[in-house]
Amino acid sequence: MTFRSVHHPGSASRALVAARAQAGPVAFALLCVMIVALAAALQGYPVLRPLMLIVPGVYACAAAVGMYVVQRRPAEVVVAGASGAIRSVWEVSGDGPALLVPVHSAMPRREGLVVGIGDEVITLRPEDWPQLEDVHRALAEAARRADLERGPVSWT
């Protein structure tokens, strides 16, 4: 079973996903730089040389933040038997298959559905997942199956 969040890119290419991810942070960061530069220019300070040094660094940092967010934001949940995958927006926009790992738990909490999957713990927020109840049922069933497959724990 596959479930999509509101952040799922659909059929958008990786280039478009990267451009969309970087647009907001870059625009905000450069707007801040331009406001400060305007204030400095109106006070008579030279701004060209500082801008030529600062703008590339600000752009690089803002673009990196955008790419970090798109690589961490969950966009798709895939459940197959006792395994599952929570794929990011970046992973979904590529051509690779989902890497299925064991589902350990799916616990509803006030902040969302907290999922233990593979070696990660991820929180799925209700505002991002229109089918959160169905996602919870599917992941809880996968966790139950994974527990049955693992069998009892031997401490000796």
Image (tube, rainbow, N blue to C red):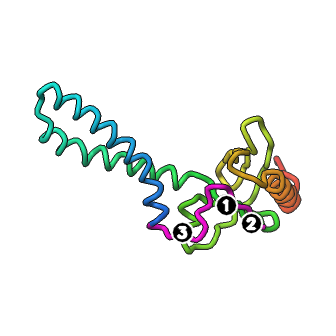
Q: Quadrant of the N terminus?
A: bottom right
Which tag, 1 or 3, sits closer to the chain's start? Answer: 3
Element under label 3? loop
Q: Residue furthest top?
A: 43
Q: Is residue 125 left or right of residue 131?
A: left
Q: Is residue 98 left or right of residue 1?
A: left
Q: Could you tell me how far apart the alpha carbons at marks 1 and 3 are, in whole angstroms? A: 14 Å
The amino acid type of the residue labelled 2 equals Thr
* Circles 1 and 2 in contact, beta carbons < 8 Å: yes
Disc sitting over residue 12 in the figure: 3
Q: Residue at x 79, y 49 (%)?
A: 105
Residue 105 in the image: above or below residue 17: above
Residue 76 - label: 1
User: What is the magenta range?
Assistant: 1-15
User: What amino acid type is highlighted by mark number 3?
Assistant: Ala
- Indicate the position of residue 122 as horizontal and vertical percent values: 67, 47
Q: Which residue is mark 2?
A: 2
Name the residue: 19% across, 41% down.
51
Report helix, strand or loop for mark 2.
strand
* Disc 1 secondary structure class: strand
* Neighbourhood count class around disc 1 (C-alpha, 10 Å): few under 14, some 14–19, many 20 upward: many
Of the image marks 1 and 2, the number of the one nearer the N terminus: 2
Say which quarter of the image contains residue 43: top left
Q: Label 1, label 2: how many angstroms apart (C-alpha)?
A: 7 Å
Q: How many marks?
A: 3
N-terminal of the pair, mark 2 or mark 3, is 2
Quick check: is 10 in the magenta stretch? yes
Comparing 95 with 15, the one in front is 15
Label at residue 113:
none
Residue 44's place in the image compared with 2, above or below, is above
